[in-house]
Amino acid sequence: MRWLVFFIIQCVIILAVLVLVQKHQEHVIVLKQPPTSLAQWYKPQNKRQVWLHTMFKLRREMLAVELYANAIANKIERNGNKNLEKWSAKLVKDYQKIGEMVPEWSNKLNYTAINELQNSVKAKHYQNVTKALRALDETCNSCHADYRAVAATLYRAPDFSGMKLDNSEELTSHMRSMSEQVNKIKIGFVDGRNEDALASLLGLQQGMHQLGDTCVKCHAENTKNYPNEAMKQMASTLKQSLEAGTLTEQGSALGTLAVAACADCHATHRLAFDAKQLLGEKKSWLELLRHGF
């Protein structure tokens, strides 16, 4: 009797989960989170982007093995065995390194294919080499489909959460202030309060220069890339239109400056940062159940 009750309870739980998923299937995106051990191979935990460069090496090594195996098989290159052996040895070494770097992914590796590739190179069975490569490629694609986008977002997107300007103001607070200045300019000239709009423009320009002093800390190759000369000219054009232009000219000048000074950078940095924050948040089951769809 107790087993029957237990079975019924399990069925009810499974049914409830299925109903919940079915109800919200158009509102939920399911992503797999990579193991936390992966973080040690990315900056800032590591001085170098070790994982990224390992992936680059694997891609290059697989291509080299394919090129030499096909060239020898088609008698295009008669003396390519030495190069094929060299690149295949590198491929085997770096492929096996994946399991050493992230032990949780060891069971995802196709050791059968990597051994077949190694043995086929030694035996000079070139068609089997390309066959093993295809099997390895399927393994790579499967893992990339599950983890590549999430890993890139978590470990390669910039983290602005703790960044401060030279005056110790939080970067997020400064960005909100600049957004307010842009909207105050619009409100000002739409309502005929052009003096207020000009004052807000001055505040926006000052904010842009302060932000530029922070941007250069990462974009070290440019001594002053924000605001650039084009942005300064756009601000000057907006100032002139606020002093003597029409509403259409003022709106056009403000839109041009806002795209260059705000939207273009946001398209790179804000989207990536917001996704990084979202994917990095830990949600309990209770929070997920309470989430309003």
Image (cartoon, helix red, strand yellow):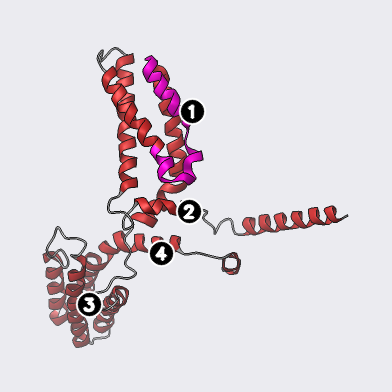
Label 3 crowding class (10 Å Cα cut-off): few <14, some 14-19, many 20+?
Answer: some
Could you tell me how far apart the alpha carbons at marks 4 and 1 are, in whole angstroms? Answer: 39 Å
Answer yes or no: do the residues labelled 2 and 4 have beta carbons within 8 Å? no
Q: Which residues are magenta?
A: 97-125
> Picture coordinates of residue 152 (x, y %)?
37, 52
For the stretch drawn in magenta, the main secondary structure is helix
Label 2 is placed on what type of residue? Answer: Gln
Helix, strand or loop at label 3? It is helix
Q: Read off the residue under disc 2.
A: 33
> Picture coordinates of residue 236 (x, y %)?
12, 74
Label 2 crowding class (10 Å Cα cut-off): few <14, some 14-19, many 20+?
Answer: some
Say whether residue 247 is left or right of residue 157: left
Q: Is residue 118 above or below residue 283?
A: above
Q: Read off the residue under disc 1.
A: 112
Answer yes or no: do the residues labelled 4 and 3 have beta carbons within 8 Å? no
Label 4 is placed on what type of residue? Answer: Gln
Residue at the (13%, 70%) spot, across then down: 232
Front disc: 4 or 3: 4
Q: Read off the residue under disc 4.
A: 277
* Quarter of the figure that contains the C terminus: bottom right
Label 3 is placed on what type of residue? Answer: Leu
Helix, strand or loop at label 1? It is helix
> Picture coordinates of residue 224 (x, y %)?
13, 65
Helix, strand or loop at label 4? It is helix
Q: Read off the residue under disc 3.
A: 247
Could you tell me how far apart the alpha carbons at marks 2 and 4 are, in whole angstroms? Answer: 13 Å
Residue occupying the far front of the picture: 100
Task: Please give the label number shown on residue 40.
Answer: none
Q: Is residue 139 above or below residue 147?
A: above
> Picture coordinates of residue 129 (x, y %)?
39, 21
Q: Quadrant of residue 28?
A: bottom right
